[in-house]
Image (tube, rainbow, N blue to C red):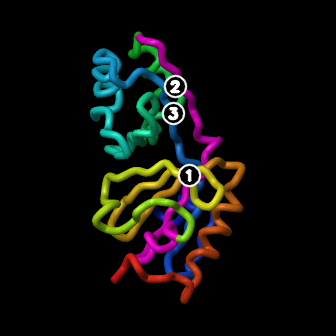
Amino acid sequence: MSDLMSFSEIDGSGAVLVAAQRRVAMVTLKADLSNKATRATLKKVLGSAVPAPRKIVKGVAWMAPDELLIMVPDGTTPEELVNRLHTGITAPALAVDVSDARAVFTLKGNSAREVLAKGAPVDLSAEAFTLGDFRRTRLGQVAVAFWMEADDEITLVCFASLKQFMFDWLVNAAQKGSLPAYLNR
């Protein structure tokens, strides 16, 4: 987990630690991900291949057949990454800095899966949701995406306009004694 200075709000009173991260630099890319030239450019610019569906590799997440969510690497700005993508990809593509449009949360603790299972229609068992898995879904009525950082750590992204609502929802869902414990047997 990141240094505590990277969080804007933390609640450790529940079964898991819930932390709202400060601004996380990220870019969304809409492009034909099946195009060989585009894939080659992405590998060169990002340092990794396009991830398989519902996977995240080296901070590059598969959002849809034509969309990636890219966590901007340290030492690079979103603007630099957008420029490199627009310069390198010759086919129609759109890369946009979405850093200010997204809120990012960390759930840390052995019951992180249980917290999300309260509101997400996803099989979060250890067999079905593992390191490198990425899900774009809903948590209650909120559009979210999340992935496993470690066996006991999940990162979640939602729209920034819902940051406080999502933080409060996660803290409420993580209350001690409220988890059904059906995933952690």
Q: Mark 1, residues whose alpha carbon is within 10 Å: few (<14), some, or many (≥20)?
A: many
Secondary structure of the residue carrying numbered label 1 = strand
Q: Is 115 drawn above or below residue 51 in the view shown?
A: below
Secondary structure of the residue carrying numbered label 2 = strand
Quarter the C terminus occupies: bottom left
The one nearer the camera, 43 or 39, is 39
**Residue in the picture at 35% in, 40% down:** 53
**Residue in the picture at 30% in, 15% down:** 37
Q: Which residue is mark 1?
A: 144
Whether tag 2 and tag 1 are in contact, CB under 8 A, the answer is no
Residue 152 screen position, x and y as percent: 37, 70
Q: Which residue is mark 3?
A: 28
Nearest to the eye among marks 2 and 1: give it.
1
Q: Is 90 drawn above or below residue 152 in the view shown?
A: above
Look at the image and give the residue range highlighted in magenta. 91-117
* Amino acid of disc 1: Val
Report the side of 19 relative to 124 (left or right): right
Residue 95 has which mark?
Answer: 2
Report the side of 175 relative to 148 (left or right): right
Nearest to the eye among marks 1 and 3: give it.
1
Quarter the N terminus occupies: bottom left
The span from disc 1 to disc 3 (Cα, nearest Å) is 14 Å
Residue 96 screen position, x and y as percent: 56, 28
Residue 161 screen position, x and y as percent: 71, 49
Mark 2 or 1, nearer chain start = 2
**Residue in the picture at 59% in, 49% down:** 23
